[in-house]
Image (spheres, coloured by chain):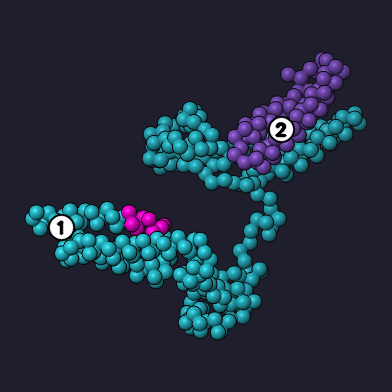
Chain colours: A cyan, B purple
Amino acid sequence: MSIWLQILIRSILIFVLLFVAIRLTGKKNITRITPFHMVGYIVMAVLAAIISTNAIANPVLGLIPLGVWVVGIIALEYLSLKSKWVHDFIYGKETVLIKHGRVMEENLLKARLTGEELLRELRSKNAFSLSDVEFAVLEASGDINVFLKSDKKPITARDMGIKTAPLAEPQTVILDGNILNEPLASIGYNRNWLETELKKAGLSPDNVFIAQVDSSGELYIDLFDDSIQNPQPKVKEMLYAGLGKSQADLMTFALETQNEDAKAMYNKNAEKLEKLLKALKPYLLK
Amino acid sequence: MTVASQVNKVLATLKGSQGTIRLYSAQAQKEEIRAVYDKAVETTSEIIYDLEKRLSEIEYREPQYKGN
């Protein structure tokens, strides 16, 4: 067998082998891996290069170390899933850097971090002032995560006492003009429904770049042609406005009528509608 | 506009709204959302019932102003 053919076959084999091996070692972001994993990947890469370029006469001698590294890393991953002790040993443990607003200098020293670096990391988390920080922890991956003091935290709807409607994630049902059946089915609709909705808006699927259905069943459409103004659904706002108008009308009737029973009935129902409006507001108005 | 026709108009709006709410209830993905809409359907039903009763009273008393 000529040498170039040998190299070709080896390269293809190693290519496939290494691809499978790396997939097997898990789905980790390259910036999040530990130094040990980094070394493992480099060793695997170098071995693969050596074997496929024929630098080792006997490929089996190259495959043995490659196999050991791949199996070793997978085994460690598996063990770290099973045992907390192994996990801590491989990945390290998090270190508390700031507790109750006070910097823990010994821990900083242990983590080989200078005050300068700590401040820089805090700034990157938008905590420019040390006095804003209640708690900060150095994760095993080297990230610093910050827990702000309660009065410095971003305000949420809950803090404001606003009730919000629970929302599930929207599903993308059209991409590049193609109707995607699987997401449609997962929210309980079918092609017919989508085509009807599009017809209502006066569109065909070919005009649509992206269409998403939110958890309340409303369709949001983005067209290829950005010069076309497509009206976004306003049904919910209309519904809210209609109910609001009915409530106002009932109150007018209550004022106009001479009949005491009718007055009481109108007032009672106007109140009911008002309560209903309050309950529906987070669902209908966004 | 007579009182009867005004009441009729509100009734129509409410019935339309109720239909839309029913649709949303059927479309809702989450149980808690469905519960809110179902409650809304119930409330509107009560109001519609009261209004219809009142409307028939008005029409009974003043048939010449039958709202339409």
Q: Residue at x 79, y 17 (%)?
A: B66
Left or right of residue A181: residue A135: right
Depicted A35 relative to depicted B59: above or below: below
Of the residues shown, which amino acid type is indicated by label 1?
A: Ile
Taking the view exactly as shown, the residue that stands out farthest to the top is: B64
Tell me, yes or no, whether the highlighted magenta stretch contains residue A137. no
| Lateral position of residue A181 relative to residue B43, left or right | left
Residue marked by disc 2: B41
User: Which residue is situated farthest in the left direction here?
Assistant: A2
Q: Magenta: predominant secondary structure element?
A: helix
Residue marked by disc 1? A7
Task: Chain letter for mark 2, please.
Answer: B
User: Which quarter of the rendered picture does the C terminus of chain B lie within?
Assistant: top right
Residue drawn at point x = 29 percent, y = 57 percent: A18
Q: Chain of mark 1?
A: A
Q: Where in the figure is residue B35, as x and y percent of width and height?
A: 69, 39
Q: Is the residue A179 above or below the residue A12 in the image? A: above
Residue A67 lies in quadrant: bottom left
Q: Residue at x 54, y 81 (%)?
A: A107
Q: Nearer the viewer, residue A5 or A274?
A: A5
Q: Which secondary structure, mark 2? A: helix
Residue A202, image x, y percentages: 46, 30
Could you tell me which quadrant the N terminus of chain B lies in? top right
In the rendering, at what x and y percent does residue A265 appear? Answer: 85, 32
Q: Residues within 10 Å of mark 1 (few under 14, many from 20)?
A: some
Stretch of the chain drawn in magenta = A20-27
